[in-house]
Amino acid sequence: MLKQKSEEYRGFRTPGIRLSEELLPDVVEHRTDRVLVTLYAFHAFDKAHLVMLAEERLIPLGDAAAMLRVLRETERLGIEQARLEAGGGMHSGEQVLIRRLSEEVGGRIHLGRSSGDLGVVSTRIVQRDKLLDVLLHLNRVRSAVISQAEAHVDTVMPGYTHGQHAQPTTLGHQLAAWAAVLERDFERAVQAYRRINVSPAGAAILTGSNFPLNRHRTSELLGFDRPAPSTFDAILSHDTELDSFCVLAILNADLGRWAEDLMLWSTSEFGMVDVPDRYCGTSSIMMQKKNPYAPQYIKGLGAASLGGLVTAFHAEKGPTGMPILDRQYSRDALWRLYDDTVRDLSWVHDLLPALRWNTSLMRARAGEHWAQATDIAGALVREKGLPWRTAHQIVGILVRVGYERGIGPADVTPDLLDEAAVAYMGRPVGLSEESLRKAVDPENFVRERAIFGGPAPQEVLRRLADFRATLARDEATYTDARQRVDEARRKLESAIDALVGSEP
Amino acid sequence: MLKQKSEEYRGFRTPGIRLSEELLPDVVEHRTDRVLVTLYAFHAFDKAHLVMLAEERLIPLGDAAAMLRVLRETERLGIEQARLEAGGGMHSGEQVLIRRLSEEVGGRIHLGRSSGDLGVVSTRIVQRDKLLDVLLHLNRVRSAVISQAEAHVDTVMPGYTHGQHAQPTTLGHQLAAWAAVLERDFERAVQAYRRINVSPAGAAILTGSNFPLNRHRTSELLGFDRPAPSTFDAILSHDTELDSFCVLAILNADLGRWAEDLMLWSTSEFGMVDVPDRYCGTSSIMMQKKNPYAPQYIKGLGAASLGGLVTAFHAEKGPTGMPILDRQYSRDALWRLYDDTVRDLSWVHDLLPALRWNTSLMRARAGEHWAQATDIAGALVREKGLPWRTAHQIVGILVRVGYERGIGPADVTPDLLDEAAVAYMGRPVGLSEESLRKAVDPENFVRERAIFGGPAPQEVLRRLADFRATLARDEATYTDARQRVDEARRKLESAIDALVGSEP
Amino acid sequence: MLKQKSEEYRGFRTPGIRLSEELLPDVVEHRTDRVLVTLYAFHAFDKAHLVMLAEERLIPLGDAAAMLRVLRETERLGIEQARLEAGGGMHSGEQVLIRRLSEEVGGRIHLGRSSGDLGVVSTRIVQRDKLLDVLLHLNRVRSAVISQAEAHVDTVMPGYTHGQHAQPTTLGHQLAAWAAVLERDFERAVQAYRRINVSPAGAAILTGSNFPLNRHRTSELLGFDRPAPSTFDAILSHDTELDSFCVLAILNADLGRWAEDLMLWSTSEFGMVDVPDRYCGTSSIMMQKKNPYAPQYIKGLGAASLGGLVTAFHAEKGPTGMPILDRQYSRDALWRLYDDTVRDLSWVHDLLPALRWNTSLMRARAGEHWAQATDIAGALVREKGLPWRTAHQIVGILVRVGYERGIGPADVTPDLLDEAAVAYMGRPVGLSEESLRKAVDPENFVRERAIFGGPAPQEVLRRLADFRATLARDEATYTDARQRVDEARRKLESAIDALVGSEP
Amino acid sequence: MLKQKSEEYRGFRTPGIRLSEELLPDVVEHRTDRVLVTLYAFHAFDKAHLVMLAEERLIPLGDAAAMLRVLRETERLGIEQARLEAGGGMHSGEQVLIRRLSEEVGGRIHLGRSSGDLGVVSTRIVQRDKLLDVLLHLNRVRSAVISQAEAHVDTVMPGYTHGQHAQPTTLGHQLAAWAAVLERDFERAVQAYRRINVSPAGAAILTGSNFPLNRHRTSELLGFDRPAPSTFDAILSHDTELDSFCVLAILNADLGRWAEDLMLWSTSEFGMVDVPDRYCGTSSIMMQKKNPYAPQYIKGLGAASLGGLVTAFHAEKGPTGMPILDRQYSRDALWRLYDDTVRDLSWVHDLLPALRWNTSLMRARAGEHWAQATDIAGALVREKGLPWRTAHQIVGILVRVGYERGIGPADVTPDLLDEAAVAYMGRPVGLSEESLRKAVDPENFVRERAIFGGPAPQEVLRRLADFRATLARDEATYTDARQRVDEARRKLESAIDALVGSEP
């Protein structure tokens, strides 16, 4: 009366069961190509769920063993291949089992489970695993940043604000700032990880089951930190996916800023850094061109991350349980973003030590555009007792007059400074030639700033030691998290061994 | 001394020409898989450019003919296959020609051209072609909407604001509103089309060429409306891509709203419409479920469109000419959005007439929750000369008291109305039973609203006739645009025939 | 029994009418401060609606005249003041009238009207009026851009792509590109204007009225182009507000790009342009600083526009009629965006001719970084018959060797070119010293590019003449639209005169 | 020679110092009205900086005491008033001091400081303080949610997915899910707090100072947890502001979802909940209307939050130090978002216990649309040993046939179930009447789900106890953070007392 048109078993999607019509091909939800990324997580959940069902005696041990054996066989063939042949999608595990073992046996796997927890468990496992990759690569970049910063504590360069020369600093100081930025990015990522690595398994669609599933056991076998304490929340709240987007959006905004710096500094006009040819392309018409390619992709990923985030927030909007398939678009985006982020972190890690800095130009520029002027005023405060504001105004006049007369920092004289002082306060200020020369020396500028967190080489090295210590702690955090996941994988296989062995 | 490591000719990317290193594999810009969508447009530009070069005698006629013959041969094989074998990407046409005809001949195609115009020409051609598909399917949906509206001018239903019953209207009136919405969507799309279908060909990277390229001819052969009047703007401005995103974002927000209505109205509680099974799925655990799938994908596409738009605007940010490869992410998104939009329009077109409306329930609901109360006040104004506000207040009291006493519109009496009137103004108002009954009749409510644009059946039909007339005009606009593009394709082939024929 | 607690008349919001409780103060919808922007439009609608009601004999002529007289009186006091005293908000007109004339008279104004059309009519009027300001200021900027472009057709400068020197062009050519960009921005704005300036008046909340309102007359009196053909669509569709956001987002992205150029070009390293001091600030610590301020606000407005757009799209999401008050946030944003946009256009208009260009530096830079290399290859094609690709490769080698040996374009010799040619194809190419010198001259580069839309001065002037002609047409479009609105205002006052006069 | 035009002292902005022209009025950066929110934080920083300068003997003790006295005086007047009179803005403290004490004294306050740290210190203080308010109100809402959940552990209602009836659950279970959601929101907020409450004071514009500022002391006096370990990062990284936006965007998306539920459930069709009148409005035309207002503002704030976030990310884009004033737009948005979030949390806190639930309707609905069907299949598995999938299919057929014949869960019989079983597997299944009745009882459905995190009343109460315990911990976290800030305030005043006292 009702069986499916084709020969193939399609379970609850067979027309004539609940619904009367075939789902239109392009409306098919669990479309194979969209879930390739999560296929391995469905497979892991299938195994862990079976183990738990058997251990709790909710299905016959023999059936469980037979099913686990088939799932292991598909691993030899490649689970992707095996599952695609069974129609693909989140329910392909059940399909494989029923086709090979009949509905009488394979029809038992889904007890107490739903597309709901299949979807959310797999989404969390994949986020967890990709986040671990981000943590690993982020730490590698942090290490490279700290090393480069150490190597450049003496590389004096201009610091910029509003695009204009602000004050001299060092490349080491600027890179140490990146160590701080990426430390926060790691913190965000690991904090999101803690919220994400929580198990929805056993929550089914929102109420769990009236079969006594052992949610703690499944959680343990899948490497989750603990089961979610509300079956309703576990399935129908998706703020942890928004967490992923926020982590990636900020991280890629940060990396994008660094890429913007590279783009700017490698212009002919700035000329401070040369990006190795292998990260660059030339032009099919302008053969002189050497275009930095990798930094543009890194910048662009910031745009894609923000767009992905907006898609996710917008897709979530609606009453509880109303938006479900809408989420497919943001989930597609999320997997790509994670992968591209790891790619970018890998580029940055390799590119950082390969950059060629024009250190002599950087040093020269640091002193050419009055970036050191702050210290002339400082000298007037220190040596002449002037209030800061008075000193500031006098040097302001000095700089303006300097520009008007074409006199730069290298040529400024105590006389000119006195002229400015007279203009401002009616009397000369009398700074010595020696003090003035010292004040306009960018290296001195940097050296004297041993304030906590400042650019003086020794201070930068002290802070870098702190960043290195935090990094070591964070590397241990990563290693521990990774090991817990690996250990769970081993536990799952042992449990399967025990079941399969017990029913040969 | 410098030739490439592998045997294959790779032209300007060969290490040892301008740059010394191989581009890292995952930094390769013109990545094959990312430009599959635009491959046919590169091919068309290759042909049109060659014809123009030959006609203007900028390359030898014999060489042009030989190259055009090879390009036509690749069409037999499938240009994708032929170009992928030559490395893929935007320069694969040149690669094919050089590999088959030597650099001496094939090396002539790129004269006066750049990756710049290759990129922008192809992006515009593909946008143009996909926009034409959107225009076509949008008009088909409009036609279906108008037909359904005509069929439902008498289907009385509640109109809602703030989620609450507002006033009775008809399904035909609500659908006629959609005719207006989609008419504006067509207008936006066709206006963007006019800005997009302008030829950057011959603009090279920003200055054109000092070879006397005939930009008008290439434009004509590629089906553009005219050449862009600034070579600088043609390559380095990308606001027309933002136009595409804006068109799609608004259109998909509009379709998404319609899908939200369907989701709401097909709940068990609303129960106004039944979506055919083929657009729905059931559940692997809750076998009673019939979940509307297609509407969720339609809603979700609104989210993806907004996200894509944000990616595009964000990727564009920067000084002129600074963001280039950043744009790859938004362009990827754009092609998917166009395709998914056409898919959704196609679903909506088929789904509209297949929806099953529970018209008796809709009719009953229209009168159950005091949606018709406006007309009781109207009757007091018309028959009793009360100011609107006074009438409004009296009926406001009536409704409150009705809710307090469990009296609905069907049971309301002149006495109760008088009670409210007394409460408000100290005297009864004396509306007759007949007037009151007429005032609470939802069908009468609708019938009396023959105001311009209102829900009275005859008025809806009049306005639908107007929408139909505009649609006819817009269909002609579409047909004309499509024919111009088709005609250009024929012109190009004729020009090639002439050249190939003249040099056998 | 029910009257309001305070003495003041508060109409339908009085507790004891429909609802029993006072609305919480911070939940009040039509909050006074949020609707100050639209207050004048409520006022206009109040007047036009009264005129129409009177002309159609839907309310007593005497009452209409009395009410119109009071409304005119409030104009003397300042409508803001008068309306704020009556509680502010969209219904403040009715409140004023009832307080002064009693509910018996003032209670008649709202016949056939709703908060729905009050809200949408006013939103459209304000958008219309602000769009007109944008159109006006945009045309003023376009005129300034064209004038500056004319003045700089001979100002040779580098053109950049990927942040690198691409090819020489002129400032006039780059500015002419801006003329094209802003022409499209005008087109978008005026197309949105046409969709926006359509009258929802008389649509009430979605069904219009069963009183025979003359919607065409109200539309005419309010300066709309025509009444909306669906009362349902007129109130419950808000895609025309999304239109506003799209227009502003693209326009401000365009202006932002120009501001990014200014920021880059005014760095010490680029040094191409000096922004007048009055658009800049200095620093409280770094007295040498001259920070471009205005360009940063212009750039930032691009960010605010994109954010506002996202707010609007997100607020709109939901079933028809469900999101209403949500829109308040995006509407607040919209008014600010419009005002800030006009401010920015005004800045740009004044700033453009005030910029000081370092034309000699720009000219020198255009030739220093091999931007002219394209033309060396061009010379090999033209004079030596080489295929483009062969010529391109030879010059690619030349440039690389030039960089390796520190030889720039000014010092390149035919011998070096021959060395590159031998390396590539085994034989020298023999370009004459004279041809080589001509090929590396940036001014010649520009002069020879008289291709349609190219940078040759005469060609730029031709295209600017076209842009000027289009601008003249667009100025007429603006003037015509403005005059229609002004004319409607006069019509409305005349109609009031007639009514007020007829009932002294 | 150069003094300012007006009489008023304007310090470094005086034309004739560094710059020659007056800043255009509408380009003024530190615009008074834009910094009103942060004015109190500038004031605190002024005081703490002076204390530190004095304690470190970097300025004369007498001058410090005089300045601190003046600052305290302004507190009596109201610092806003005093500072506005001195021109407003971030430098108004210095302006006040110089005007009252002359540049000789007041000109000393800014030593070692910059607009840079003034801006970032104040931004962080205000974020810190507003975040504390969010934490407080969030915990109050969590407490209310837990209380309501406890009160409703027996309130059976339908759970929905895809908008369709999924399974019975309880209102207590659904509210307990909210406890979990808001627990994560608190965690995000407090984690962001830890990153934000770090002191940039003493970092000046990026290099700190060559005066030996005690950054730890200033940090302590301002209630920061510690000084930022890089002066460069402290000023030029703004990812902690993005943190704020992410926290608010997710929190308001969560609250928005809850508001969407309210909107849906308070429709006439759902009718599950009644929102008190004081959160609702009626209509000026449809006097029957009771429109939920507050939930719409809550939903809308989600839109504003996402838009604000996009503004912030977009404004940040660019090389390090290039976007500065661009940020003004997102900062404006941030303050409003924080305030509106606290307003919404306050509404939710009050609204939750005031909602009136139609519990009998909810209970009835839970059983009317086959939401309990899962348990019929469960009974077949448990009692008849069927595989889950077989049982699922049989009940799928049962439901379809039920809909076809108009038979609902209340009327389903063992015979009908057998008919379905025969159709699927060729034989009846023989479930007893008693088992079937139990299986279709929604209360039994809920009661049996005592699985960890499930809806059984006792289990919900257990989990709520956990949530309450976590809340207690989080309340302590809040209190501790608030006390540290308050303690710092006292420390600062004591330090001032000491200084002011020492120099009468």
Image (cartoon, coloured by chain):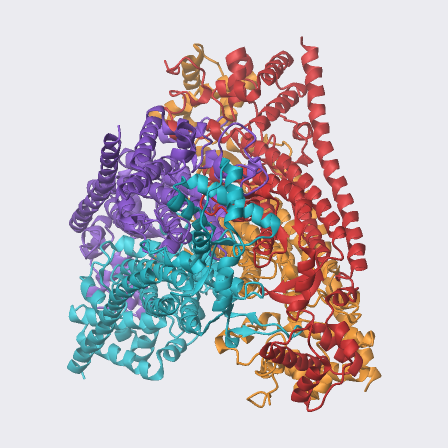
Chain colours: A orange, B cyan, C purple, D red
Residue C340 rendering spot, x and y as whole percentages? 38, 38
Residue at point 70% right, 43% down?
Answer: D139
Could one spot residue B361 in this view of the protein?
yes
State the quadrant of the N terminus of chain D: top left
Residue at position x 78%, y 83% from top?
Answer: D384
The C terminus of chain D lies in which quarter of the figure? top right
Q: Looking at this rendering, what residue extends furthest in the top direction? A: D504
Given residues C295 and D2, the one toward you in this image is C295
Q: Quadrant of residue C48?
A: top left
> Could you tell me how many numbered marks the image carries?
0
Residue A233 shows in this picture: no
Q: Nearer the viewer, residue C29 or B425?
A: B425
Residue D203: which quarter of the image? Answer: top right
Q: Residue D191, how many percent across, how many down?
A: 67, 45
Residue D357 horizontal side relative to residue D328, left or right = right
**Res. D454 image quadrant:** bottom right
Q: Residue furthest right?
A: A502
Nearest the eye: D370 or B408: B408
Can you give x and y, in whole percent of width and height, for residue D224 in the image?
A: 67, 33
Give the x, y percent position of residue A486.
73, 67
**Up-down relation of residue A92 to residue D149 (above or below):** below
Q: Is residue D481 left or right of residue A171?
A: right
Judging depth in this view, the residue of D204 and C247 nearest the camera is C247
